[in-house]
Each structure stands twice: as C-alpha cells, then as structure tokens.
Image (tube, helix red, strand yellow):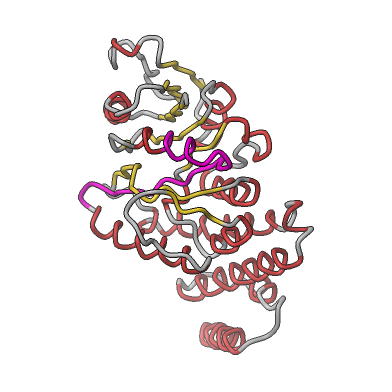
Amino acid sequence: MQITVVITTHDRPELLREAIASVEAQHFDEWDVIVVDDGSCPAVALEPLHENLKGRIRLLRNEAARGPSEARNTGMRTAAGEAIFFLDDDDLLAADALANIDAAFREDASLNCLFVNVEPFGSEAEGTQHNQIKAVTRVLAAMGERLESTEGVLRLHSDLLFSALLDRIPMAFQRVAIKRTQLQKVGLYRGKGFEDLEWYYRVALRCTCGLLVAPGYRVRCEGQSYFSRPEEKQRLIDTIIHIRKGLLQLDEVAATPLLKRMATASLASAHFNKAYYAYQNKQPFPWRNLFDSTVNGLYWHHFSLAGKALKTAFIKR
C-alpha cells in the first residue's frame, strides 16, 4: 500500500527537516511525502532538505498563510497514495509507524480509517503522556472497551465512538491514517484553528475505524500548550460551542434520535462551561449561555451558578 504523508509547515525549517527525516527512516518503503508550505517566510526550499528524496517528495505552497486546516486540505487534494497520513512539522513518526498502518489495513480490508496512538517526547512529555493515557482510557471505557494489549488494532463502533468523543478528543484520535477513497465521503477540514476538531467527528461517523494501539506518532511537548494562554482557552470554549451546533446539522446525527440527544446534551454542557468559565475569570456573565444550557432541564448546578453570578453583580454595584 502506498502511503502519502502530508506535512504542513509554517516558519519552522529545522523542525521540518526532523519531521521529514523521521519519514525517511521508516521500516517501510512504499511512501511519498507532500510538504505544504503555509506561507513561510522565507519560503521552504526542498533542495537543502534531503537530496536523496527527489521523486518521493513534493512541495506545495500557499503564498499567504491560510492555517493548518486549509494546508491539510491542499495536501489531501493532491495526495495520490492509497492511504493518507498527516504529520505536523514539529512532530515525528516512530520508525514502525507506516509499516504498522500498512499491516493493519492489509489484515482487515473493511477498515478505512486508523487512529494512531501517540508517544509524547520533550521537556513536558511525562505530564502529557499521563493525561493522554487517562483521556484515551476514558474514551474507550465510554465504548465499553479497554486496552488489553500493547499492539494490534482495536475495532471501534461508529456511533459509540462519536458519542465517546463528544466529551473530549484525545490526541490519539486526532492522528489519522485514512484511505483516500474514503475522503470523498468524509469531506475536507472546515474552519480554522480549533474548528478542525469537527473533522474527527465526521471521520467517526462515516468511516470504519480502528485504533492502532502501538504508539506510532511522536508528539513534541515543549511548551506549545494553549492552556497557558487564557485567550486561547476562551477561543477553544467558543469553538466547542460552534462545533457542537454544527454536529446537530450532520445528516447522520439529525436522522438518529439517540445521536441527536447526545449532541444536544453536549452542546448544553458546552454552554454551561462557557458561563462557568466567565464567572471564574470575572468576565461579563453570559446569561444567554446559562439559559441555553438548560435545554435538557434545570438542575442544581444551574441555580447555583446563577446565584453566584447574581451575588457578584450585586456586590459590584
């Protein structure tokens, strides 16, 4: 199976060299690379990267930066491999990653998408690894599954996967190898930034998925986390609300009462989280979000938060 690795990059030439080198070092030979330069200045030049990769690596460029999602779309439109795998320019592939992806697809022809488990590295790797194991365990538990082996593929039920990811999407479920023939059904990434998370819900609903248990994707952890930037946290909260509104418009969700109820409940939870975050951070209180969070009924936490917000507003007067 030919696997096209799409690497999106912006202004990180040294890290890009490392990412490409990790593909070159694969214990698997049927691969090619598409590098999408998303408006780097200066522009990426392939010549000094890896001379021996001529014919196996192609460079595409957006003259102005359009964001990682649109860069991935550019790579997807151009990829010729039977399967497509996405690699960020600051991350690496484990040496057996592509071989394991190829083997998984060959062993089970019904699979058309693989989520690839991650292995963090770098100064903040230990904490990230702990959090990711915990997050993946919770997602699998929500589907009645658990990791009983350190290798192989865990088959995932589409509806159960969709509902399990409504609470969170661990990094392992954001690292995707997908058969190119399936892309027309899934569609391209939409929006920018955190909005790209919506694509993984469409993958969950529209693909026959498995989780490649052995970590094949090495995530660099060197202080890139948005959690240290309050404005990014706020943007993520708003994006989650936007995404969950969009999920209700998906044909699969609209036509399935159980999925629709789950998506509605997750949207209500997102509205409440926005209201609670605003209260905690002494921001203007979003009463509309609190009201929208009661779509499935009024509960004690609604009254409690409303009381706290009213008390704070009274004290300010």
Q: Residue at x 51, y 41 (%)?
A: 108
- Residue 146 appears in which quarter of the rendering? bottom left
Q: In which quarter of the image is residue 26?
A: top left
Residue stretch in magenta: 101-123
54 drawn magenta: no
> Which residue does the image show at 46% across and 34% down from the upper left?
85
Residue 246 appears left or right of 210: right
Residue at image position (71%, 68%) is 258
Q: Nearer the viewer, residue 107 or 235?
A: 107
Q: Which of 49 and 63 is in front in this view?
A: 49
Indicate the position of residue 100 as horizontal and vertical percent values.
38, 38
Residue extending farthest left: 123
Residue 120 covered by magenta stretch: yes
In the figure, 2 relative to 302: above or below? above
Find residue 139 and report its horizontal and vertical position in percent. Answer: 48, 63
* Count of picture labels: 0
Farthest-out residue, right = 255
Q: Where is residue 246 in the image (x, y as percent from the top left)?
A: 69, 54
The residue depicted at 47 percent of the width and 51 percent of the height is 173
Would residue 192 appear left or right of 229 to someone viewing this image? right
Q: Quadrant of the C terminus?
A: bottom right
Side of 34 where 133 appears, left or right: left
- The residue lying toward the viewer, choosing from 92 and 292, is 92
Is 12 on the left-hand or right-hand side of 170?
Answer: left
- The answer to whether 170 is drawn above or below residue 54 in the figure is below
In the image, is residue 252 above or below residue 55? Answer: below
Image spot of residue 20 (x, y percent): 32, 25
